[in-house]
Image (cartoon, rainbow, N blue to C red):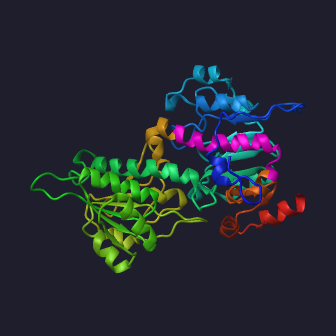
Amino acid sequence: MAMSSQGKYSFSDFFTKGQFETLESPLLVHERKSPLSIGIPKEVTMIENRVAVVPHAVRSLVGYGLEILIESGAGENSNYSDHQYSEAGATISYTREEVFKANIVVKIAPPTLEELDLMQSEQILISPLHLPIVTQEFLSKLMKKRITALAMEYLQAENGVFPLVRVMSEIAGMTAMLTAAELLSHSVGGRGILLGGVAGVPPAKVVILGAGVVAEFATKTALGLGAAVRVFDNDITKLVRLQNSVGRPLHTSTINPVYLAYQLTSADVVIGAMHAKHGRSPILVTEEMVSQMKEGSVIIDVSIDQGGCFETSEMTTLDKPTFVKHGVIHYCVPNIASKVSRTSSKAVSNIVTPLLIKMCESHHVESLLYSNPGIRNGCYTYRGHLTNEYLSKRFELKYTSLDLVLTSSI
């Protein structure tokens, strides 16, 4: 594995680490008194179909000496059976309480307040942090129990890439466009438009806000289906990269409110794909702009997990994914990738597994956080401290710099 000039593993290397490496055979092995345990509960909120760790990853984790506790049925919606997990070396638990007693709890959806009540003091929580549903009570419970919480979507690589966001964005971009094609049909209240059109009939017009990974894969999917695409972003470098990736000239523009409003009036589909490095995604489309859109047009706000980039956006779930406002169909599901749960579960597992292995090897989460700034970026509570400045300002809670805490404790 490549090492940095300072002798420390980079976060990027760490996330691409091989899971079956030949290791040196030491003369003396200091064994744990008890193995580090990983708890994987069954998701019960937001119609979440994914699971954080798949069976083939369990086999790797067990090989590193970790104990895996998985709640019965946790992988069913991704077509993974309890038998497959058991054969891989996991212990199947039939009580949620047992799973939440593990040293590290890994979830694919944010924990509920009831689930936080089941957690123990000084545990580690790895899960997404969906900003629209975060409450002061949620943060207070984490701090009261001195839980170290890592937000999956804010774990960052050295080159600035967010690994989990990257892979989920690829899936979300493709899924968003395919979902838009469904919502345009008359049977679900759409305008009865075929996304790509046919000979003699113009294609649907798609406006994409953002030029990141979601936009890239949404654009490729839309163009593949024959739609006409407009892409908006204030980062010219991203727009150039997107055009190079697509391999053809595109209609692109910086985010000028007047020109954007003009394009929205004739749009059939609008995809919100803005990602914020810290805190909330920016609101680019006002309610007034939405009210001027065509009746039966479709908005898909992929940025809803960070608050959304449409003023009219409200978080929805997969069982009731849409609502209509000003005659426009809104689709604001934060876990849109859960529609293709098996593919998504494998992708998440590929990101989470090396992180768990590194935790096992480091023995102490402090040293892991201290040596990996990308992981520190995802830590929002640490042993009773709120270490995310945006959350502290939003809820008027005391903010503590994680860098200072770690420096004083190591």
Where does the image place residue 122, in percent across and percent down from the top left?
Answer: 82, 46
Where does the image place residue 80, in percent across and percent down from the top left?
Answer: 53, 27
On the image, which quarter does residue 129 sit in?
Answer: bottom right
Question: Is residue 193 part of the magenta span, yes or no?
Answer: no
The residues colored magenta run 345-367
Question: Is residue 354 part of the magenta span, yes or no?
Answer: yes
On the image, which quarter does residue 115 sit in?
Answer: top right
Q: Can residue 324 be seen in this view?
A: no
Where does the image place residue 339, in percent across and percent down from the top left?
Answer: 43, 41
Residue at screen point 76% across, 67% down: 399
Instruction: Using residue 18 as the reference point, say whether residue 171 is left or right of it.
Output: left
Say how many tags the image has: 0
Question: Does residue 310 lie above or below 340 as drawn?
Answer: below
Q: Is residue 294 visible?
A: yes
Where does the image place residue 261, in percent across and percent down from the top left?
Answer: 32, 74
Q: Main secondary structure of the magenta part?
A: helix
Query: Relative to the observer, which residue lies in front, 361 or 178?
Result: 361
Instruction: Using residue 165 as the reference point, say whether residue 329 is left or right of it.
Output: left
Residue at screen point 40% across, 68% down: 239
Question: Does residue 117 lie above or below 78 as drawn?
Answer: below
Instruction: Using residue 274 as the reference point, say whether residue 19 is left or right of it.
Output: right
Query: Relative to the observer, which residue lies in front, 4 or 394?
Result: 4
Residue at screen point 29% across, 49% down: 181
Quadrant where the C terminus lies? bottom right
Instruction: Using residue 262 as the reference point, say whether residue 2 is left or right of it.
Output: right
Residue at screen point 62% across, 33% down: 57
